[in-house]
Image (cartoon, grey):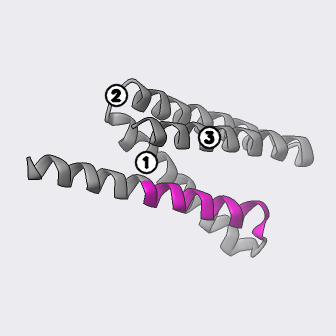
């Protein structure tokens, strides 16, 4: 589970930087608050995975699902790849990665 935890921690860092850039460029306080909140959520789920708590997978999956939906909405409203399209693709990729991981883990448990 270490590889998955590091993926979540890297994504959390990326979300935090995105929120800070949104604040710096557009003086968007909601961007800073949302970026920090979701970065803490994703970092917490990554740390939970490092400590072998499987709930970290589900928290990470929920957070990435919310961000996928949000950035899909933003992208469809603007059709600008940066930042909405890129964050949509990254969030959707993370969500898919975590869903496949949960399915793989459930298959391993049921085969024993």
Identify residue for label 3: 10
Q: Locate residue 36, reporting x and y percent.
A: 67, 34
- Position of 49 relative to 76 (above/below): above
Residue furthest out toward the left? 112
Given residues 26 and 81, the one toward you in this image is 81
Question: Does the magenta portion include 24?
Answer: no
Would you say the magenta stretch is mainly helix, strand or loop? Answer: helix
Closer mark to the observer between disc 1 and disc 3? 3
Q: Closer to the camera: disc 1 or disc 2?
A: 2
Check the picture and name the quadrant holding the N terminus: top left
Which residue range is magenta in the image? 81-97
Query: Circles 1 and 2: CB distance less than 8 Å?
Result: no
Query: In the image, what residue occupies the spot 67% across and 44% down?
Result: 15
> Residue 52's image quarter?
top left
Q: Give the mark, 3 or 2, whose residue is nearer the N terminus.
A: 3
The Cα–Cα distance between marks 3 and 2, rounded to whole angstroms, is 18 Å
Q: Which one is earlier in the sequence, the residue at label 1 or at label 3?
A: 3
How far from the left and from the top, in percent, is residue 27? 88, 42
Q: Nearer the viewer, residue 27 or 93?
A: 93
Check if residue 87 falls in the magenta segment: yes
- Crowding near pointer 1: few (<14 within 10 Å), some, many (20+)? some
Q: Position of residue 73 (x, y in %)?
A: 62, 67
Q: Going 76% across and 69% down the picture, which residue do you hit?
A: 81
Sequence-first disc among 1 and 2: 2
Residue where numbered disc 2 is placed: 52
Residue, disc 1: 62
Left or right of residue 34: residue 110: left
| Distance from Cα at disc 1 to Cα at disc 2 | 18 Å
Instruction: Tell me the SS state at disc 3.
Output: helix
Q: Is there a contact, CB below 8 Å, between mark 3 and mark 2?
A: no
Q: CA distance from mark 1 to mark 3?
A: 17 Å
């Amino acid at each position: 589970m270490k590889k998955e935890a590091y993926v979540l921690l890297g994504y959390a860092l990326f979300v935090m930087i995105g929120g800070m850039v949104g604040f710096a460029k557009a003086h968007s306080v909601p961007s800073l608050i949302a970026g920090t909140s979701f970065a803490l959520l994703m970092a917490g789920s990554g740390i939970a995975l490092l400590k072998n708590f499987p709930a970290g997978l589900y928290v990470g999956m929920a957070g990435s699902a919310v961000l996928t939906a949000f950035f899909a909405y933003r992208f469809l409203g603007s059709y600008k790849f940066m930042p909405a399209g890129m964050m949509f693709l990254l969030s959707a990729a993370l969500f898919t990665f975590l869903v496949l991981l949960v399915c793989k883990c459930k298959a391993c448990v049921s085969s024993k």
